[in-house]
Amino acid sequence: MMLSIEAKTNLEDSGYRIVGQHQHSAVKTCRWTKKSILDQGFCYKQKFYEDVHGIKSHRCLQMTPSLPFCDHRCIFCWRNVDLNSPTWQGEADEPTEILDGAIEAQRLLLSGFKGNPNANKKKWEEAQNPNLCAISLDGEPTLYPKLSELIEECHHRNIVPFLVTNGQHPEHLEEISEPSQLYISTVAPDEKTYTQICRPLVTNSWERLNESLELMPSFNCVKVLRLTLVKGWNLKDPSGYAKLVEKAEPDYIEPKGYMFVGHSRKRLQMNNMPTHEEIAQFAEKLEKLTGYKITDESEPSRVVLLSTE
């Protein structure tokens, strides 16, 4: 499935760079990567997990091998979900080609910092060689037929792969090579809310998610449940989420507030964005229900970390 010229132009205008022969992969430099190079802070992933993986915001490669393949059209997604296709179409590029192209594209996107007097030159130089690959930019990565090889290629290059999945393909999760960190997006406490907020393009979506959550304890890597919370939609029923946590047995839980950005502004309103205080209050309820402990937070990203430790 090739992107139309209009779709590709729109993505590039918003900061994407399409890579690979078959144009199903892309990279976009995260704003925290840029801020870190300017010594203006770093993202919550570094704050939460630097001691675990040794990752740095300025060395993060935010990419996808599955543009525009996804089986959800989540209302909170900042991407253009109208492009989404629930099944893979066409040929698949090799992981080496994708990673080479993504790293080169990111170097070009960051090239202007070389002459910026406010940039930390050491960080800029380190950013030329990423040590974290966030496989999360767009689409659903478990639809990419060569995901295991992509994860293995990251490990081979000493790049930490973070895999973020919507949990719709437990049959693929059963077979993939383990990433360094596995996120499963768990964005509803019940089936009705899940259908309303994720707007799935496949049948049995809630059952598929729960099958993936049941598989989570079998992974040896770091495991995280990501709760993207939208006020007025799924910021409710902490006991429902607690049951899913019990099933998945993750190492960490990340309740995170929806951000009013990108294409989601066409579907939601500013008042659907929770405050950090509201996320913190929700995290406290999860703490009481799950036995997990609040161990960190990042107010700029409106996210709280709960841990078994």
Image (cartoon, rainbow, N blue to C red):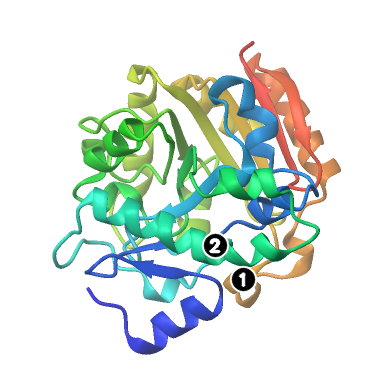
Image point (60%, 29%), residue name: 253
Q: CA distance from mark 2 to mark 1?
A: 8 Å
| Left or right of 114, for residue 7 | left
Determine which residue is flagged by label 1.
262
Instruction: Identify the disc placed on residue 77.
Output: 2
Element on which disc 1 rests: helix
Element on which disc 2 rests: loop
Percent position (x, y) of residue 3?
31, 78
| Left or right of 91, for residue 297 | right
User: Relative to the observer, which residue lies in front, 79 or 37?
Assistant: 37
* Mark 2 and mark 1 residues within 8 Å of each other at the beta carbon: yes
Closer to the eye: label 2 or 1: 1
Pick whichever of labels 2 and 1 is earlier in the sequence. 2
Image point (18%, 59%), residue name: 92
Give the number of marks: 2
Percent position (x, y) of residue 30?
60, 56
Q: Among all residues in the image, which is located at the extreme right?
A: 277
User: Relative to the observer, which residue lies in front, 180 or 29?
Assistant: 29
Instruction: Identify the disc placed on residue 288.
Output: none
Q: Among all residues in the image, which is located at the extreme left?
A: 91
| Left or right of 147, for residue 128 | right
Q: Is residue 58 shown above or below 65? A: above
Q: Amino acid at mark 2?
A: Cys
- The answer to whether any part of residue 236 appears in the image is no
| Left or right of 166, for residue 120 | right
- The answer to whether any part of residue 63 appears in the image is yes
Percent position (x, y) of residue 9?
44, 84
Percent position (x, y) of residue 42?
72, 43
Image point (69%, 49%), residue name: 121
Label 1 Cα crowd, 10 Å radius (few <14 / some 14-19 / many 20+): few
Q: Amino acid at mark 1?
A: Gly
Q: Is residue 99 shown above or below 184? A: below
